[in-house]
Image (cartoon, rainbow, N blue to C red):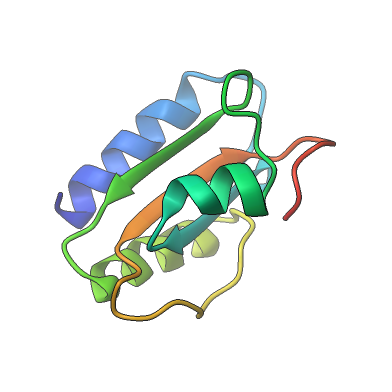
Amino acid sequence: MTNAEIISQIDDYMQKIPGYTNSDWYVGIASDPESRLFTDHQVDRDKGAWIYCPASSDTAARTVEDTYHTAGCDGGPGGGDRTTTFVYAYLKTRSTDP
């Protein structure tokens, strides 16, 4: 996916869940987004609000991640390696672990 397609898909998903601002969302990058979401961040697979998209490269994934952080989403820069090509987002709750 292109960066614009990833941003569009994530934005569309976030907008389908009304009542939250960008600061309520965590956006990161991962090589294994399911492990990162459901194990590391403890997002509920069935009841949680989450999405992930493949980027064309780790550089592209980092660019999209930076775009969301600049827009006020939670998350930290850096981490990962050349295999870190997925961008993920989830709605933070009391049970998730940033």
Q: Residue at x 50, y 80 (%)?
A: 78
Q: Residue at x 38, y 63 (%)?
A: 31
Left or right position of 12 against 19 = left
Across and down, in percent, residue 97 comes to 76, 50
Across and down, in percent, residue 63 comes to 33, 69
Q: Relative to the observer, which residue lies in front, 62 or 44?
A: 44
Across and down, in percent, residue 38 comes to 59, 42
Q: Quadrant of residue 67?
A: bottom left
Q: Quadrant of the C terminus?
A: bottom right
- As displayed, is residue 37 above or below residue 62? above
Q: Residue at x 47, y 25 (%)?
A: 15
- As displayed, is residue 69 above or below residue 24? below
Query: Number of labelled discs?
Result: 0
Q: Residue at x 57, y 28 (%)?
A: 45
Across and down, in percent, residue 75 comes to 61, 62
- As displayed, is residue 59 above or below residue 73? below
Left or right position of 94 against 38 = right
- As displayed, is residue 62 above or below residue 71? below
Q: Quadrant of residue 3?
A: bottom left
> Which residue extends farthest right?
94
Q: Relative to the observer, which residue lies in front, 96 or 72?
A: 96
